[in-house]
Image (tube, helix red, strand yellow):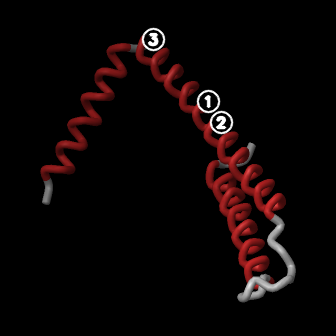
Amino acid sequence: MATAQQEIKNLKKDLNQIKEMLSAQVEDVTPNGAAGPRIDVDAMKDRAREAGEKAREYLRSKQDQAVVARDKAEQTIKDRPFVTTAAAFASGAIVAALLSRR
């Protein structure tokens, strides 16, 4: 399973490839609009669609992980209400102590 950082790197890599392809195509087009190589719009759309699908898939997987983490936290709170209350109180006290220092 790829980590979030790796997945973000892969998405950035895909977007950079799209950017490079667009730059290369634009450089090939003549400035006065004369006949020359044309931008392959379909290829660009396909690459953009693929990048969008990967982004949606990444977000779905992260959403699923967040739901699992939330459910696990809720179950832990139900199983051990006093321990979680004490942990929350201690965490709050530590944060308050750190914020009051200058």
Residue drawn at the location 58% of the way across and 25% of the way down: 68
Q: Label 3 sits on what residue type?
A: Asp
Amino acid type at mark 1: Asp
Cβ atoms at labels 1 and 2 below 8 Å apart: yes
Picture residue at 32% right of the left edge, 15% below the top: 82
Check disc 2 and report its element: helix, strand or loop. helix
Left or right of residue 39: residue 96: left
Q: Is residue 52 left or right of residue 63?
A: right
Residue beneath disc 1: 64
Whole-percent x, y for residue 85 in the image: 30, 21
Q: Earlier in the sequence, mark 3 or mark 2?
A: 2
In the image, 34 versus 85, the foreground residue is 34
Q: CA distance from mark 3 to mark 2?
A: 27 Å
Q: Residue at x 17, y 45 (%)?
A: 97
Q: Position of residue 46 (x, y in %)?
A: 80, 54
Residue 86 to residue 75: above or below: below
**Which residue does the image show at 24% across and 41% down from the upper left?**
94
| Quarter the N terminus occupies | top right
Residue 61 - label: 2
Q: Residues within 10 Å of mark 2 (few under 14, many from 20)?
A: few
The residue pinned by badge 3 equals 79
x and y, in percent, of residue 39 in the image = 80, 71
Q: Nearer the viewer, residue 6 or 72?
A: 6
Q: Quadrant of the C terminus?
A: bottom left
Which picture quadrant has residue 24? bottom right
Cα–Cα gap, marks 1 and 3: 23 Å
Q: Is residue 27 above or below residue 8?
A: below
**Of the two numbered discs 3 and 2 in the rendering, the one whose residue sits closer to the viewer:** 2
Amino acid type of the residue tagged 2 in the rendering: Ser
